[in-house]
Amino acid sequence: MIKKRAGLSALAVLGATAIALTGCSSNGSGNGGDSGSTNASGIVTTNGSEPQNPLIPSNSTETGGGKIITSIFEGLVSYDADGKPVNEVAKSIDTDDSKTYDIKLNTGYTFTNGEKVTAESFTKAWNWAAQKSNAQGASYFFENIEGYNADADSELTGLKVVGDDEFTVTLKSAQSDFPLSLGYSAFMPLPSEFYKDTKAFGENPIGNGPYKLDGKGAWTHNQSIKLVTNEDYAGKRKPKNGGLTITFYTSQDTAYADVQGGNLDVLDAIPDSAFQTYKSDFPDSNVNQAAAIFQGFYLPYYLKHWSGDEGKLRREALSMAVNRKQITDKIFDGTRTPAKDFTSPVISGWNGDLEGSDVLDYNPDEAKKLWAQANEISPYDETLTIAYNADGGHEAWVTAVTNSISNTLDIKAEGKAIPTFQEALDAQTNDKLTGGSRTGWQADYPSLYNFLGPTMGEGSSSNYARYDSAEYNELLAKGRSASTVEEGNKYFDQAQELLFKDLPEIPLWYSNVTGVWSADNVKNVKFGWDSVPLYYDIEVTK
């Protein structure tokens, strides 16, 4: 699994740069069959993973929780299949200076307990999420709103309620991509019921989205969660089905077998064992398309050998010791593309020709030389490990990467399996890693910054490597405060050029979304720019 979504996701601009990543679905429309009557009350079954935390929008920062949150909540905007922001609860989002935003709301949205969604539903939720004492994983999304304080509880003074259906947001500095971020789960509204007992709410959340939990007990931990259509939903993502059952598989092979057997309708992650056969197994119901997903691995700075000059040498040596093209060809069968940066080619402004990116080229001679130089500083006599969650289908590629490193550098390197994604995230969050770890990022909203800030920026909850660079953080800040997205991207390019020198993360490849579905059970299956199926659009034929 991938840390999301962050857990939101990014804007897919499928231009020429993205075409190289994009395979083709066997059914170009993504419908997976057009015959058969539909069952509007039919339940779509799909795969997922146990959320890391209770289902509170500002603390659901990975794909397991994020997939559920975006189904049961509706924000100011949502994203269409191509990643284009679409106004939902927001009627308009206006600004003259990219610093102060006036947000007017559509009327008619209610939470599933009947409470009206108002301006305060947003401002109070954002204020709560931003408080240090509430320890929310996505609190940093509010850092540019006036009044935010990362070190102590502080009111977001930049939020002002004008009326039930209008509020304003004043930022500390101009942020041209702010409207693009507002579909991310951290910005979802919350009902007044939430503040009475946040713990209980997290187990049985009350949302305002296209789906709702199927009563108390709908979430069976480590097994599944059952959602049903919210009949009072007023937005544009009106479900064409009766609900979702999301099963938390611990093996992608098991999930794949269930689709083959007709026991699972939609699978959004093909196991590596099926890469060569999934198109023939599902000739009219498969997809292989570009998605805003980055994959890599990292060595935490708190470990011996991985900081200072020694650490820089070793990181560069590891990067040059990995034969990315060979691994993507042999292990992934064309469903991955070797990385050229730390973001994704489907994001507008992507640059595949940044200075220093040659450190991502396979160069065994230079890798050996750099590793030897590092050994002169401090001999390395340990086994290099890369941790991965065993329930995510990562074993084959981690083995290939560690074999490439081992053979090139003449050291012992191997994968370290952690049973579940949740356990792997806990180890990263609590600085319990004893070696390296795989990492992945599914973009939250359409901006290069969303790949760079949350994963390696100062104070970011997903900066598991504990990278700390004043120069990098300054470049991020300049990029965010630029007058236009295009101007900001110039600073983000400079920030990436610094990353190529420091390598807090070692880029490996960009992921496509590869998925299959049961053509006998469902139709009109489409996958979004962020790799998540558009569940609300799926029609049930069983």
Image (spheres, rainbow, N blue to C red):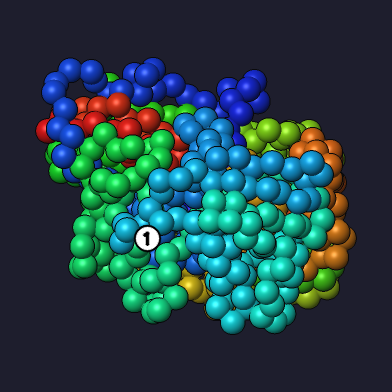
Indicate the quadrant containing the N terminus: top left, top right, bottom left or bottom right. Answer: bottom left
Is 94 placed left or right of 12 in the picture?
right
Residue at image position (59%, 82%) is 133
Q: In which quarter of the image is residue 476?
A: bottom right
Above or below, 336 against 220 in this view is: above
Residue at image position (76%, 51%) is 100
Q: What element carries label 1?
A: loop
Query: Identity of the amino acid at label 1?
Result: Glu
Is 447 placed left or right of 83 in the picture?
right
Residue at image position (29%, 54%) is 212
Residue where numbered disc 1 is placed: 115
* Residue 508 in sight: no
Along the line of sight, which residue is nearer the eye, 507 or 237?
Answer: 237
Measured as percent of width and height from the top left, residue 290 is found at: 52, 32
Along the line of sight, which residue is nearer the eye, 407 or 463?
Answer: 463
Above or below, 319 against 353 in this view is: below
Indicate the quadrant containing the C terminus: top left, top right, bottom left or bottom right. Answer: top left
